[in-house]
Amino acid sequence: MSLDDAQVFTRVVELHSFTQAATSLGMQKSTVSRRIVMLEERLGVRLLNRTTRKLRLTEVGQAYYERCRQIMLDFAEAEQAVMQLQRAPSGLLRITAPIEFGQMFLGQTVGAFMREYPQISAEIEITSRSVDPVEEGVDIAIMVGQPQDSTLIARKLFESSRRFYASPEYLAIYGVPMSTADLSAHRAILLPQDHPRYWPLKGEQRPCHCALSCNNITFAREAAIAGAGIAGLPRMLCREVVESGQLVELMPEVALPMGELYAVYPSRRFQAMKVRAFLDFVIQRLPPDDREMLEP
């Protein structure tokens, strides 16, 4: 099969008309019809059942169309990739991100990206809500945890290790836990990714008394500083308050589930240069001691 055959056949199927296919391809209708007949003769199968009013794919024609369509998509993608190599990223880049990531990291990163690529403009929403990038027309939705929607592409940006933290005042009242068994006597501050009835432990289930649950890690950190309980928080968010004595890191040998951050977008196919360039730019600027570099 030649690429021209695939193009002619897919155009006829998608437009449901030899006449319209011929017009879109700049050919005579008789040429298109002859090409389809020759294709069927070469393959030894009937691909289309046609009357004066309708075209209908045969079963083998449907299978053949799916393969031809994929070939045409791959060809178009290859052409676009080559053309994009000759162009700098440009256009409006729409991004959503969690509040803490936006405040601590994204602002400077977007600014630096726009300085390097002045043809880029950006629209950023810093939010704790869940965002569907397809429904809301977002180029990149940065979110904690992998999305449940399998039709979306999720690229892991980094993993941040978590530890248990509590304030000195809290520990003076409730005592310092020396092992996970001691957690039964303590109050838990939980995040949305944590199970509501268990301490956030990796490979171990221990029931907890949930004193506070919230959807914001900075809020959880501040509540822990105020003495509300023990929180499992990202280390990168707690370094300064540990150094200042506001929080104490507990049981550093205990493994907690990693805090994972993903960049989520609709599809790799025909991915805009601005999206690809920004993701690569972000990866290169992430904190090196908390990231896990992954291939796109």
Image: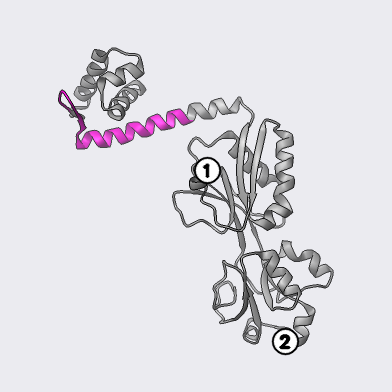
Identity of the residue drawn at 78% across and 85% down: 172
Amino acid tagged 2: Tyr
Image mark for residue 265: none
Q: Pointer 1: what residue? A: 137
**In the image, is 55 to the left or to the right of 5?**
left
Q: Which type of secondary structure does the marked residue at label 1 adopt? A: loop
Identity of the residue drawn at 69% across and 33% down: 117
Q: Quadrant of residue 116?
A: top right
Amino acid tagged 1: Gly
The crowd level at tag 1 (other Cα within 10 Å; few <14, some 14-19, many 20+) is: some
Q: Quadrant of residue 205?
A: bottom right
Q: Earlier in the sequence, mark 2 or mark 1?
A: 1
Which residue sits furthest left? 51
- Whether residue 8 appears in this view of the structure is yes
Indicate whether 230 appears above or below 293.
below
Tell me the CA gap for discs 2 and 1: 49 Å
Q: Which type of secondary structure does the marked residue at label 2 adopt? A: helix
Q: Residue 254, position in %: x, y?
A: 65, 74
**In the image, is 54 to the left or to the right of 193?**
left
Q: Main secondary structure of the magenta part?
A: helix
- Point out the stretch of residues depicted in magenta: 50-77
**Foreground: disc 2 or disc 1:** 1
Q: Residue 87, position in %: x, y?
A: 61, 26
Image mark for residue 174: 2
**In the image, is 18 to the left or to the right of 117?**
left
Q: Residue 149 or 41: which is nearer the viewer?
A: 149
Q: Give the total number of marks visible in the rendering.
A: 2
The crowd level at tag 2 (other Cα within 10 Å; few <14, some 14-19, many 20+) is: few
- Whether residue 288 appears in this view of the structure is no
Q: Residue 191, position in %: x, y?
A: 61, 69
Indicate whether 89 appears above or below 28.
below
